[in-house]
Image: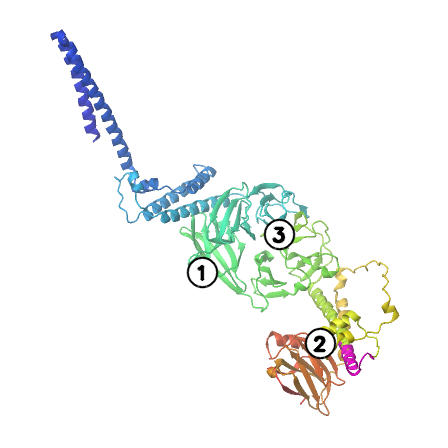
Amino acid sequence: MLIRLAAIVHENASQFKLADQETALIKEINFNQIGYYHNLTHKRKNNMKKWIVASLFLILMAIGWQLDVQLSVVEKINAAFPPRPEVRIQLETLESLIASDDVFLESFKTTYDSRLTLRALTCTQGHSISRFDAIDNIKQLAVDRDCLNTQDDELLALIGVKLVGFRLAQASLKPLLKLGPPTVVHGAENIEVYTGKAASKAGVAVLRGNRNEFVSVEIPSGKKIASLPTMPEASQTDYSVSPNGRVLAVVVNSRDLRFIDSETGQDLWLAKGINQMYAWLPELQAALVRGNKSGNEHSAVLLLDFKKGTINPYSTALRNQSWALNVSESPSRLLIGSYKDFSMIENTRTSEGITSNVVKEFRIKSPSGSVSSLTPTLMFNGKAIVFVTGRNVMLFDLETTNEKIWESGEIVGNNYAKFSEDSILVDGHSFLNFGTNKPFILNVKDSTLSPVETEEGSQGIIYELNGRTGFMRRGYQKLWVGDALQTGRSVSLDEMIAGRKLEKQLKVLEQEERLSKARLEILKSGKEIGYMPGKDYPQRSITMSQADLREFLRREAQQGRYPKIDMNRVPFAMSPAAEAPAMEAPAMAPPAMPPITEMYSASANAVRRQEISNTTTRMLGNIPGNARVEAIGIYETKDRSLAGVNVIVKKSDQPIVLMLSAYEPVKWNLVKEPGANLIAVIATGYHLAEVTGAGTSKTIIKRGVYAYQPGGPQYQALNNEANFWTGKSISKFQGAYGGTDFVIGY
């Protein structure tokens, strides 16, 4: 067509030249006809100009048509329906960060172009488009807009994965330095810090304020690196810093994961449908996350492959995982699991991607052991993990699978930080009489506790530094980081736990002794009042104050445990000294506390055991060595009878201690046959019981445990109660949900 148009132009130009020659000839032949031919020539020139303009327009049209033809179908479709503006902006961001000759960028462009091809062909299915179709005509097609949006989301994910991967592959943002003694972080002075997370291989921490502000700081200097976006939709604690400190991953709206450049505060990627960062795998240029989209392929563990720019289900089938922990880089291994079960998985990059294999599977066998909300901490150079189970600390050996649980909830709190390969920093409870929480170093290898003597940074909430030794503390308007502390002489953790238990038992026992005496006083007073008419009540002194006794009687009468008494008519004789206003005791300085190493030493615990023995003997009498413990347990009386439960005590050679337990407030009617050798009665349950017919047998009525069938934790607790009071286990147990009559002693 171009040749034809050129011929037309050439032909018209020739005619234009011929016209000039004719004009000259005519001038020579007939000068009189000049005017006529001049007009004719002028018309021909105008016609030639019109032909030239038209020819040029046709040429330009042809060139444009030819250029449109040179575009591929895919290019025409993407030109007609270009990606969304945010896709183009993210693409420009990526290209601005990476040098044009970088191999990383070249490989990305290849992948990006293939995704554009997929976008064009997928979203125009059902339409016939050829190389000869103009872009303007393609724009008029009814293309699936939802498909285009979905494909644009995929392009954004590709760019986002590559952006995060580029940052993850860079060197540490700040060098990893030893932190030293506790140092105040000043880089967040305008933020009331709520929590903080640190990078495992860089001197970087990201702090979160109470108003959802985020700021990155250098540690230990505390120098501010950058103010990051404020995110009201961010999770309270669920965020993570990449090992090199360059990327912050924050869960937003409980359903998406937002990646931010911690050096500049720039958004890198909003990963939709991903709501947890399990673990960074920088050695493989990857990360493990949890997807929350519908469908099995998205609801389990996903692998973000930053090198290939893909998001795929993890090759090892895992579901309902709540935590993951990096173990080693070479080989790339991690632990991932839930409350009771977890697995050691090894990851390997091949030419086709990343493969994973289960190296070993673990299960926590201890009934009371499980991984609570906090992610476990790697100890002993990767040979064990430490974690919180309930209120206690647990150690799990990955080589031997041995388990150890310290009932540390009696001594220390749940927050801790890794201090060394065999110890963690914890806070002791304020009951240790130090006025405030006292920090300790808990050595999980030796089972010892050492008091921290460094004063600076010794108060506030403890935070772990995520993969590195050291700690972060948030106090009032201050934040400290450190990894070096002065400590005192260590003590046995087991001795401290035992001592604390004995201390609590002794306090409970002393309280029970006071209540037991008070109940006897109340019962005796009630009987005397019941037989005395009118206002001629005998005046007698009692061991409880008027207000306490009146309140105690009211509660007991409401629950039907003792004779109902008109408490407004109960007299209280008080001595003149008691009626007089109490004088204020002179202020006394609190007694000096003994060192922690002496408070729960073996000798101090021996004294507590003796005090407990003395108290139980006062309350229950001496229990002969040949005595046996028989127990009866019910939930309630049969048909909820108010008559109670009858217990016949037969003649026996052995002394008998009878344990009675029930959930409901049961009335126990004891009937002793001649020769019955009942030396003591212990009635325990959720509600206070009533015991009749005990006679001279020592009787204790208390709130506590109950069991109506053997086996199980309730029965074990009842048996522990028997051991506590008598030093003996239950030798015979009778139980029923609804009880009426029982016989013991035969």
> Residue 95: x percent and y percent?
44, 38
Residue placed most toward the observer, 131 or 662: 662
How far apart are labels 1 and 3 at the CA level?
32 Å
Q: Nearer the viewer, residue 225 or 233?
A: 233
Secondary structure under badge 2?
helix
Badge 1 marks a residue whose secondary structure is loop
* Residue kind at label 3, given as amino acid type: Thr
Q: Position of residue 10 (x, y in %)?
A: 19, 23
Q: Between residues 693 and 403, which one lies in front from this camera angle? A: 693
Answer with left or right where residue 169 lies relative to residue 208. Answer: left
Which amino acid type is shown beneath numbered disc 2? Ala
Q: Which residue is mark 1?
A: 317
Residue 604, compared with residue 32, is above or below; it is below
Residue visible at 42% across and 46% down in the picture: 158
Residue 560 visible to an observer of this rendering? yes
Please count the marks in the image.
3
The reply to whether residue 736 is visible in this rendering is: no
The magenta region covers 519-536
**Amino acid type, callout 1:** Ala
Whole-angstrom CA distance, mark 2 to mark 1, is 62 Å
**Where is mark 3, residue-wise?**
469
Look at mark 2 in the image and give the residue it sits on: 557
Q: Percent from the top left, x then y, of residue 680?
A: 73, 82
| Front in this rendered view, residue 547 or 311 | 547
Q: Nearer the viewer, mark 2 or mark 1?
A: 2
Overall secondary structure of the magenta stretch?
A: helix
